[in-house]
Amino acid sequence: MIVITGATGSIGRALAGRLRGHDALAVVRRPADDLGIPYAQADFDTPATIGALLSPGDRLFLNSSLWPGVIDAQRAVIDLAARAGVAQIVAVSVRGAAPGARLGMGMHAQIDAHLRKSGVPYTILQPSGFMQNLPRDFGDGTMYGSYGPAPVNYIDARDIADVAAALLTGPVGASSEHVLTGPESLSHEEIAERIGRAVGRPVRYVNLPAPEMAAHLERQGIPRPHSGDLAALMAETGDGSWAPVTTAVEDLTGRPPRGLADYLADHESAFA
Ligand SMILES: NC(=O)c1ccc[n+]([C@@H]2O[C@H](COP(=O)([O-])OP(=O)(O)OC[C@H]3O[C@@H](n4cnc5c(N)ncnc54)[C@H](OP(=O)(O)O)[C@@H]3O)[C@@H](O)[C@H]2O)c1
């Protein structure tokens, strides 16, 4: 059986859709009748509830949003998966995950390290930022950020789901790690311009120095030091380090990743 955690999220929902017709189970916190596959209710905050769903030979998609307890929760689920005899774990990490890195990149590094030592065959997916964030970021027509003029890569979360589906339904191969990107990297001004053209109204990106961005985030209710870390992370990803694209999506699925034009064509209403 293929067990999908985070099944109601932007990757998980698409993955559940790809796995209709397979022996797949969605792990959800609340009833979710619209996923198209059977579901079971469980919670990372009580890892044993997820462990209880796992049997020898299962394949596990390890994915959730981030909260302060996520490192312990995902590590506990990895241990339970090893004990249950799970055949493979495909885990969602993040591009740039590294020990001591900021925010999610540092958290994922700790989970990734635990998975590498688990003894379970694994694939770690390290995606760029998701295009699915753009409607939120440009919601009222203006996105504020500290990315500067450098190109930054975004990936359509549906491509991460396609990669995961290929890995979870094919033979379990050697453990591996992949940086997943979209096909092109654009500056935030270019992204704003393309969204504006697609939705037929002006959309703009306003660049702020990191300290001003941190103050802007605080006014929006994000407390210190998180606000400062988020602004600093934007400046760091805008230094060009998130610009290179990889061939991983095409290597693993046999077709190139979706571009921003594909995403916008399918999600225009999300910007309404
Ligand atoms: N967003 C990005 O741009 C981006 C970029 C690179 C990597 N990533 C990584 O991708 C992963 C997914 O991130 P996301 O923000 O995009 O997630 P998301 O789409 O918001 O989905 C998160 C999923 O996790 C589930 N979840 C959260 N807490 C849970 C818990 N305690 N127990 C069980 N399920 C729980 C949510 O369920 P509910 O519906 O019940 O809340 C939801 O299904 C994260 O590891 C993130 O670091 C994200």
Image (cartoon, helix red, strand yellow):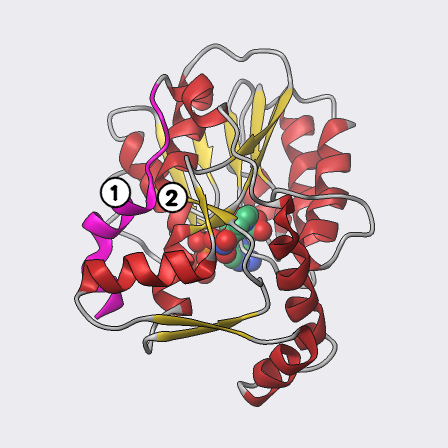
Residue range (magenta): 255-272
Instruction: State the residue at coordinates (46%, 34%).
Output: 3
Q: Judge whether residue 64 can be spotted in this image.
A: no
Name the one closer to the observer, 9 or 21.
9
Q: Give the residue at x 61% y 56%.
A: 238
Is residue 102 in the magenta section?
A: no
* Residue at (41% x, 35% y) in the render: 183
Residue at point 38% right, 57% down?
191
Q: From the image, which quarter does the C terminus lie in?
A: bottom left
Q: Earlier in the sequence, mark 2 or mark 1?
A: 2
In the displayed structure, 151 sits above or below 4; it is below
Q: Residues within 10 Å of mark 1 (few under 14, many from 20)?
A: few
Instruction: Name the residue beneath numbered marker 2.
Output: 156
Q: Nearer the viewer, residue 210 or 58?
A: 210
Does residue 127 lie above or below 267 as drawn?
above
Q: CA distance from mark 2 to mark 1?
A: 9 Å
Number of marks in picture: 2
Q: Which residue is mark 1?
A: 262
Q: Amino acid at mark 2?
A: Asp
Task: State yes or no: Cβ of the residue under disc 1 lies below 8 Å from any atom of ligand 1.
Answer: no
